[in-house]
Image: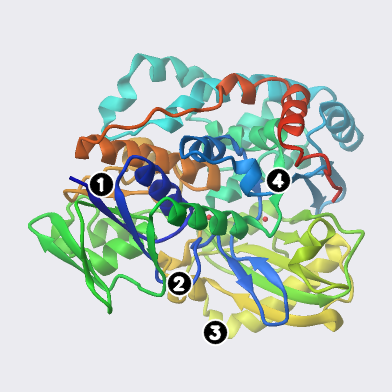
Amino acid sequence: MTHTVNIIGAGPGGLACAMLLAHAGIRVRILERASVPGGRTSTISTPEGFHFDLGPTFFLYPRILEEIFTTCGYDLNREIEMIKLDPQYRLVFGNSGELLATPNTQRMEEAVTALSPADAGSFTRFMTYTREKFEKFAPVLEKPFESWFDLASPDLLRLLPLLSPWRSLDAELGRFFSDERIRLAFTFQSKYLGMSPFRCPSLFSILSFLEYEHGVYHPIGGCGAVSVAMARIAQQMGVEILYNEPVESIRFEGRRVAALRTSQAEYTADATVINADFARTMTRLIPDHLRRRWNNRSIESKRFSCSTFMLYLGLDGIYEHVPHHTIYLSEHYRENLADIEKHHRIGIDPSMYVQNACVTDPSLAPRGMSTLYILVPVTHRHPNVDWRREAPRFREIALDQLERVGIHDVRKKIRYERMLTPDDWEDQYEIYRGATFNLSHNLGQMLHKRPHNRFEELAGVYLVGGGTHPGSGLPVIYSSARITSKLLLKDLGVFQPENRSIDRKEWTQAPSTREASLACSTGLFQNSQLNPQE
């Protein structure tokens, strides 16, 4: 008998889960509300010929997705062309100074020392220490956490001194770097989780480590092109993807989902995987009386990540001197974070991220033109900010901030423009409170305290994506797909084919050795160029 699984949403987690389930012989159906795959990791394409990533633009730690492709009989490097960036990005500090981040250890040491002589040698010490942390903690991120009993394992308890969960990310980096600007260079990655480095747990120092150890990549066509390739492969494997077909209601039999209903049909299945935004799906599609732990009142009380104010600009000309990725860190960085997380208001000197992707990938714009992707972290949707009134003013603030990173006279060059506010993230993209990075990753909302991959409230329902364990960020979302698919197959009593996975040692060896082996085997990373979430 062939089992059938319905998946709500064709985001990266849903697509990866679909591939793994199809490989195991499951009949998989994905119901997607949009006309393209990828969810937040999709592509905005305009009639003028501009292409933008809607959400994520950094492609990090390819190992997990590469293993998923290998398991399913595909080669990630053959399906998707990627360029490894060096420098990875430019950091501009509002209180003076710049740093070109490079995966080359010697050059990175020299760059850190030039900015802060007192921190000479600290980069190597940080990498050595965090490499051990990552190697020991990575297996934790690859298994489910369904109760506090999972925390009591001897292996995890032995890791506590190394992980130091009681320490903030900024305090952790303070053990290595004395200059606050250098600490910011290795902690701003907490924004991938929608959190402040002064509140984010110290174990997430592995985020910056992964960038320098394994590189920052640009998939040709953008991260949305990865989603397109995954959807194509899933369909080749027999997955049915129904676009423009949002789930409007669910038919229940007791606490079990019996069928998903759209405007077109009712779809029954043996199990259901939710890849849509967790909180939005719960409050919109699952009756409150069926949810005890995650009822509406409980969800309302949880901490949610920040949101983002977005500008997607199609321009005449190309800013050739501006790197692929640039991050501006506000002169008043702490106050900026407090405005976002505590006061829920708009500041006057916001930090921002700018992607100038056409210096690497000209395919994203017509000849002689380019794209600019501007992301400003802001509060999630909150009564303090009326975006209908504030959006035009904040647009001017964002465009003015471009001057700080060397992008001048941009207003005269704009030929296409699209803006997204937290209101738009919620209303157009079905994201609860417009919190683009889902539930926050504080200690009270991690591991077994996060919504479980085998959803604890309903029978036959599973979660995948940034709203479940392990959390947000593309590599972690792909990891959630592996965890969820394994649990689902086990519950259905389906044999799980052996994975032909890459040896972890290959991804923890010295970077120069690993990169050389990748270059020889794929031939895709020989053109490294110079040069911000489901």
- Amino acid under disc 4: Tyr
Question: Judging from the image, what secondary structure is the residue with disc 2 in?
Answer: loop
- Amino acid under disc 3: Arg
The CA distance from mark 2 to mark 3 is: 24 Å
- Amino acid under disc 2: Ala
Residue 280, located in which quarter of the rendered image? Answer: bottom left
Q: Nearer the viewer, mark 3 or mark 4?
A: 4
The CA distance from mark 2 to mark 1 is: 25 Å
Is the residue marked by circle 3 packed among few (<14), some (14-19), or many (20+) residues within 10 Å? Answer: few
Of the pair 199 and 471, the residue shown nearer to us: 471
Give the mark, 4 or 1, whose residue is nearer the N terminus: 4
Q: Is residue 132 above or below residue 301?
A: above
* Residue name at image x 28 percent, y 48 percent: 462
Label 3 close to label 1 by CB (< 8 Å): no
Give the mark, 2 or 4, whose residue is nearer the N terminus: 2
Residue under label 2: 34
Label 2 close to label 4 by CB (< 8 Å): no
Give the mark, 2 or 1, whose residue is nearer the N terminus: 2
Specify the quadrant that holds the N terminus.
top left
Q: Nearer the viewer, mark 2 or mark 1?
A: 2
The CA distance from mark 2 to mark 4 is: 26 Å
Residue under label 4: 217
The CA distance from mark 4 to mark 1 is: 33 Å
Is the residue marked by circle 1 packed among few (<14), some (14-19), or many (20+) residues within 10 Å? Answer: some
Residue under label 3: 388
Of the pair 242 and 118, the residue shown nearer to us: 242
